[in-house]
Image (cartoon, rainbow, N blue to C red):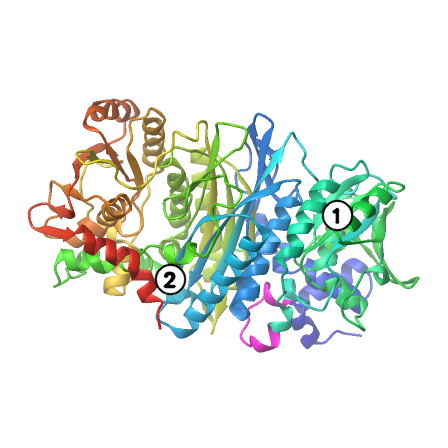
Amino acid sequence: MTVSKETLDEIALSRSEYEAIVERLGREPEPLELGLFGALWSEHCGYKHTKALLRTLPSSSKRLLVAPGAENAGVIDLGDGLAVAFKIESHNHPSAIEPFEGAATGVGGIIRDIFAMGARPIALLNSLRFGQPDNARTRYLLNGVIGGISSYGNCIGIPDVGGEIFFSDAYKGNPLVNAMCIGLIEDGKMASASAKEPGDLLLLVGADTGRDGIHGASGLASRSFEDQAEMRSAVQVGNPFLEKVLIEACLEALDLPGVVGLQDCGAAGITSAAIEMAERSGMGLKLLIDEVPRREEGMTPYEVMLSESQERMLLAVTPGKEGPVLDLFEKWDLDATIIGEFELGENVRIFDNGVELTSTPVIILTDAPEYKFISVKPEWLTVLQNADLSAVPVPSESPASVLLKMLAAPNIASRFPIFRQYDYHVQTNTVVEPGGDAAVLRLKGSKRGIALSTDCNGRICYLDPEVGTAIAVAEACRNLSVTGAVPVALTDGLNFGNPETPDVQFQLNESIAGMSRAAEAFGIPIVSGNASMYNQSAGKDIYPTPIIGSLGLLEDVEKHSTAGFKSKGDVIVLLGTDSVWDDIDGLAGSEYLDFIHRKVEGQPKLDLELEIRTQAACREAIASGLVASAHDVSDGGVAIAIAESAVIGGIGATITEGPGDRWDAAMFGESQSRILLSVSQENLKKLEAVTGFSNVPMTVIGTVGGDSLSFGDSISVPLAEADNAWKNGFSLATSD
């Protein structure tokens, strides 16, 4: 019997995909089987439009312990018996429908990916995108998402130490909620999501299974959505207190001799978790679906298999050694139930009360189609890139007035109203708090530390996906370098529109190429990631937003730098340029051009060789104790970077040279590879020696001191006014 279009639409399979299933099976699939295919062949689980591209990303490093895609997260060796697991994941569509639960369960899911590796979660970051905050629905989504993130992280006791947020109407109908988690692995105690031998038992531990989240992977994450009301049942509900206990129980269980595998029950629930474990193990699997504990009456096998109820894990346990494992979970007051066993063969066999419902080859279930496409640059993009930026009018307002406006802009103003809701000191490892370029954490028992950041400017990626994504990599690394940390690994969160359209296919191809080019230039691997497609509403795609999460290593955590100016009389220096001010080309894709003129146009540029040399010189100067402060020049340009360093440090600055006639481009242009430093007079010569040896341009632009920001003879802004604009701009923008 031919399946209906309505059924295929519900599970996000195309007619051609259904026909491929029939051909591979040699028969029509059973209804339950079709649900399994819908989940495992979904964009969210199967990566149909991205896996060919993802294979091109650099993933080799002497530090790499777990390669991308091999397990739940990538793992990097830090030496001295320490390693870190880290990854970024999205929960975009659920957060658009139920912002609190969508964001909260996104945090819960990424945490489970990390402790499934045997890692103790030590930090969270988030990367968020919304429409403009003067919109009532945006404020509703924003408050719900921030509430969900803070509630889950605070309750579970993991510090939320950083991240970023960006506002644009490109995300008005489809916000982006990406969560990143970092976990610490000690003494090589790394777990694998696989069984070892036929006969190994499959245990389900944690929460009971309900109907929440059914079709989450296929229905929400793998197609465009318009009618949000009918999709609310696909949004999961989280319980952070249960997950806290689950973390402790699972990490303790890994020390038991019978526990050989650990897997998160995430997207597509038991379906993806169990079947992917079988695939990794090279075995078949017998599932006893009637053994699954349920919190709702009358659940069908289909509902049990596809439920995405939260706070559940799967364990592979050696037969005969399950007793201590069951006792341990009972001690933690958690359900632990044997729901199957791994077996010789190639099929997953699902039983209900002794009756075999399905028997399906694992490899067919997990081998989703792989789509390749030809990338053609759209004509509209060429028009935007060739725009004459010199035709942009200079504002009639004074430079001082525009500077204060820019400091209060939603994309520049202080994020303190957000991160004050997070507990970022829990676990007592936080050395550099949220609000700077990157977070810094100490590694207990060691003098070393790690730095963490997320970054991506979707507006620049929209104007040039290849260059824009390379810039995202460069800036994520620059955020680490200005703390003194050496970038060692990256994770990516790919957020794109409908991958079936030519424009998005072009964006995907170019973006992955730019990511690969930049990561190879830096010589660091991309160890994990996530792809979220079909981010669109009312037929309009979001900006291409390939978020980059970065991890850096500090050999001595005490030798780090922060963004704020420190002492009166220090010299202000720009690395990466021999000019104080920017030029007209720097306006391409800039915050100034969008915020003041409502234009998104121009050709972004990046000199990767200059970028890498500049960052290396910055790190060397910090490690040598030459630097009082260091700050990335990015959104808003050099004038904003100077103002931020002044406000954070509570001390003014005088810039010797004025910005000239095109003061707007000079002050607010966003040319790349620039770092703002302050150094003492006695260290200036030593810094010049470092930059000269590294062939890095450098220019002295002014001095720290006073109670104002002065640019040349004609522009002066009281520090108190700049402080008020930056610190209160965001809260004013989001108030009713």
Q: Residue at (10%, 52%) from the top-left corner?
A: 661
User: Which residue carries the number 2 mark?
Assistant: 167
Q: Is residue 459 left or right of residue 504?
A: left
Front-lying residue, 623 or 151: 151
Placement of the C terminus among the 4 image quadrants: bottom left
Placement of the N terminus among the 4 image quadrants: bottom right
Q: Is residue 184 magenta?
A: no
Residue that extends furthest to the left in the rendered view of this protein: 713
**Of helix, strand and loop, which one carries label 2?**
strand
Image coordinates for residue 370, horizontal then vertical, percent: 63, 54
**85 in relation to 510, above or below:** above
Q: Residue at (54%, 70%) from the top-left corner?
A: 97
Q: Is residue 222 magenta?
A: yes
Q: Which mark is residue 264?
A: none
User: Which residue carries the number 1 mark?
Assistant: 277
Instruction: Let me know if residue 496 appears in the view.
Output: no
Dot 2 alpha-carbon crowd within 10 angstroms: few under 14, some 14 to 19, many 20 or more: some
**Label 1 is placed on what type of residue?**
Met
Q: Is residue 227 left or right of residue 521?
A: right
Q: Is residue 17 left or right of residue 575?
A: right
Q: Are marks 2 and 1 in contact (CB under 8 Å)?
A: no
Image coordinates for residue 531, horizontal then vertical, percent: 55, 54
Which quadrant of the structure image shows residue 451?
top left
Looking at the rendering, the stretch of residues picked out in magenta corresponds to: 219-231
| Comparing labels 2 and 1, the label whose residue is closer to the camera | 2
Q: Residue at (84%, 39%) from the top-left corner?
A: 197
**Label 2 is placed on what type of residue?**
Phe
Name the N-terminal-most of marks 2 and 1.
2
Image coordinates for residue 419, horizontal then vertical, percent: 42, 54
Q: In this view, does 669 lie to the left or right of 7?
A: left
